[in-house]
Amino acid sequence: MEAFIRFITDPQNLLSIGVGVLVFATVLTLLSSMTGGVKLDKRMKAVAERRDELKRRSRANMAAGQGALRHTDDGFKKRIVDRLNLTKLLEDPKVAGQMAQAGYRGPRPLTTFYFFRFASPFVFMIVAAFYMFVIKIVDWPTMNKLTLVMAAAVAGFYAPNLYLKNRITKRRTSIMQAFPDALDLLLICVEAGMSIEAAITKVSQEMGPSSVDLAEELSLLSAELSYLPERRMAYENLGKRTNHPGVKSVATAMTQAETYGTPLATALRVMAKENRDLRLSAAEKKASALPAQLTVPMILFFLPVLFIVILGPAILNVMDMMKEGG
């Protein structure tokens, strides 16, 4: 036990572990980018299986007079959430929509979110208390250590929300980067005479290498168009899952085209241009913010090196002159 404590309190060992974790994360990121096609095939296959399952269960429930089509969650996390009534205790009306925007569907991810939101403060607090009072990694007063432990508990409470928001932002960015191109392909398919369902299915297959998330959303849209009673509901669900003005405007235009019989190709052409303009404005906004964001890294990393290169020879000459004079 003492050897383990000495190992985890050694700064060099902690630095080695941190470097190893960073290297592992880098390798994992590279491998995930190389295996994007396999991930796309699995997710597309899961959406197709889910669509077939919904159709099969819908027919069976209609024959039996039932109407439940949702997945059930009977894991230990579900039992803990129900026993502690965490759904009411940590109730947040926006969580269900945020889970859909992050790509997590069904009751199981929602149960997992509430479970970790309840357990994370205790885990963070125990880890912080272990380092502060058992290992004593820093020699601080007791009140400061207690403050740090409570701060760790607060951070643990908000950690699931931060992870969910980060996941939503990354997914939305991935979708919107490829969405104008998807609209162009959809326009070509519609003008070629394909039905909207076949066009969406074709575009979802073609957009896989560019954005797996967008391909999944389009596949889910195609599945909902096939079994929902109204097409409007499928388009509205697409807008809710992405929660982006560009996608919502496209969903509204497609709904109006279906309702009033206006040419769908014209609406898609206009929406594609608007979304390209939105993508360009987002890129310009990001580029204009780069100088301000690079100020601190330049001060911390570039200026010290520059001073060393410029003033280093002069300082060495002064030192040599002082030695010769002495």
Image (spheres, helix red, strand yellow):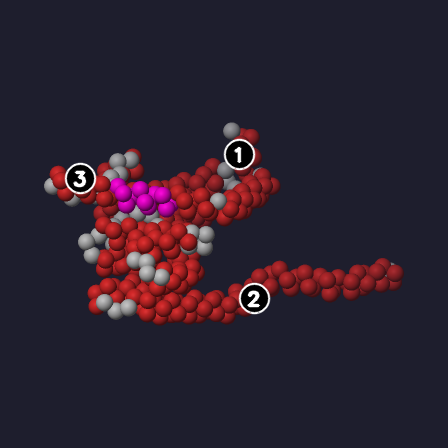
Magenta part of the chain: 43-53
How busy is the neighbourhood of tag 1: few (under 14 within 10 Å), some, or many (20 plus)?
A: few
In the image, taking residue 39 as reference, residue 243 lies left or right, namely left
How busy is the neighbourhood of tag 3: few (under 14 within 10 Å), some, or many (20 plus)?
A: few
Q: Amino acid at mark 3?
A: Ala
Magenta segment includes 317? no
- Location of the C terminus by quadrant is bottom right
Nearest to viewer (mark 1 / mark 2): 2
Residues at marks 3 and 1 touching, judged by CB atoms closer than 8 Å:
no
In the image, taking residue 14 as reference, residue 133 lies left or right, namely left
> Who is closer to the viewer here, 183 or 291?
183
How busy is the neighbourhood of tag 2: few (under 14 within 10 Å), some, or many (20 plus)?
A: few
Element carrying mark 1: helix
> Who is closer to the viewer here, 216 or 173?
216
Element carrying mark 3: helix
Q: Name the residue furthest left.
A: 65
Q: Amino acid at mark 2?
A: Thr
Q: Which residue is mark 1?
A: 5
The answer to whether residue 80 is visible is no
Q: Main secondary structure of the magenta part?
A: helix
Disc assigned to residue 295 = 2
Disc assigned to residue 60 = 3
